[in-house]
Amino acid sequence: MLDLIAESRCLGCDCASPASLCAECAAELEAPLRALPTRHTLLTHAVALGAYAGPIGTLVRRAKFQHDLRAVGLLCRSLDAALAVGVPALPDAVVPVPTTPWRVAARGFHLPDRLAAIAAPHFGAPVVRPLRRRWGPAQAGRTYGARLLAGDGLFSLAHPVAGHVLLVDDVVTSGTSVHAAAAELLAAGASAVSLVVLGAAGPLRRVPVGIS
Ligand SMILES: [Zn+2]
């Protein structure tokens, strides 16, 4: 009985909402992919579903830290729909940014793995896993300077790669992990590295992307 009268809340902003997302949060998740500036980066293209500060960040935290399968489902469906509208590049391989095996074991799943599996069919490219995450302290809660220092040597290489590689991650904040991964892939033989993330910190250029 309590369940029947309990007020349901939006998973993105916690407002009272009969649906799992309120109209505002749903609109944020239905927006086209946004291009991120790649000047002074190792990336050829970078796109995000939206801002980490908004409902996308809330859903990512629910998915990762509370293992909320409704949040995982909403994020996966949004990425799938956004990629169906337009893709930033045509990669030869899709690479989820890895975490440590013990963190995967603790969480029971790795969100970038799920996202890579969603993304790959849009490009007709295989999911490959050439990177291994070296052991190190968690990135969350560290300062920007500490993250930059930690970036070098974050990953090791399991096998070489070729062609244009698309990295897939859940969030990009300082960019340390993504740049360390891109550097390893370029050194390993990739001709270019691009990025798709769900949530990006900082200002985003609101430019719809797609292959014309
Ligand atoms: Zn909401």
Image (cartoon, rainbow, N blue to C red):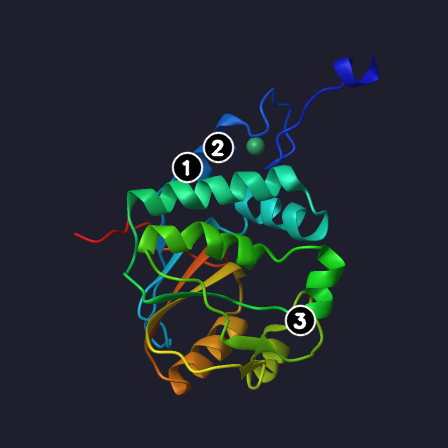
Residue pictured at 48% horizontal, 50% vertical: 51
Question: From the Cβ of disc 2, is ligand 1 less than 8 Å away?
Answer: yes
Q: CA distance from mark 3 to mark 1?
A: 31 Å
Which numbered circle lies on residue 26?
2
Give neighbour class at mark 3: few <14, some 14-19, many 20+ (Cα, 10 Å). some
Point out the tag, 3 or 1, that comes first from the N-terminus.
Answer: 1
For the residues carrying marks 2 and 3, which lies nearer the camera in this image? 3
Left or right of 57: which side holds 6?
right
Which of 128/91 is in front?
128
The image quadrant where one finds the N terminus is top right
Question: What element does badge 3 sit on?
Answer: loop
Farthest residue to the left: give it: 212
Give neighbour class at mark 2: few <14, some 14-19, many 20+ (Cα, 10 Å). some
Q: CA distance from mark 2 to mark 3?
A: 32 Å
Question: What element does badge 1 sit on?
Answer: helix
Left or right of 89: which side holds 9?
right
Give percent across and percent down for residue 119: 41, 53
Left or right of 182: which side holds 54?
right
Give percent across and percent down for residue 95: 46, 66
The answer to the question of whether label 2 and label 1 lie on touching residues, with beta carbons closer than 8 A, is yes
The amino acid pointed to by label 3 is: Thr
The amino acid pointed to by label 1 is: Glu
Farthest residue to the right: give it: 2
The amino acid pointed to by label 2 is: Ala
Look at mark 1 in the image and give the residue it sits on: 30
Give percent across and percent down for residue 180: 50, 79
Point out the tag, 2 or 3, that comes first from the N-terminus.
Answer: 2
**Image vertical order of residue 159 relative to residue 93, above or below:** below
Residue pictured at 36% horizontal, 84% vertical: 189
Look at mark 3 in the image and give the residue it sits on: 100
Question: From the Cβ of disc 3, is ligand 1 less than 8 Å away?
Answer: no
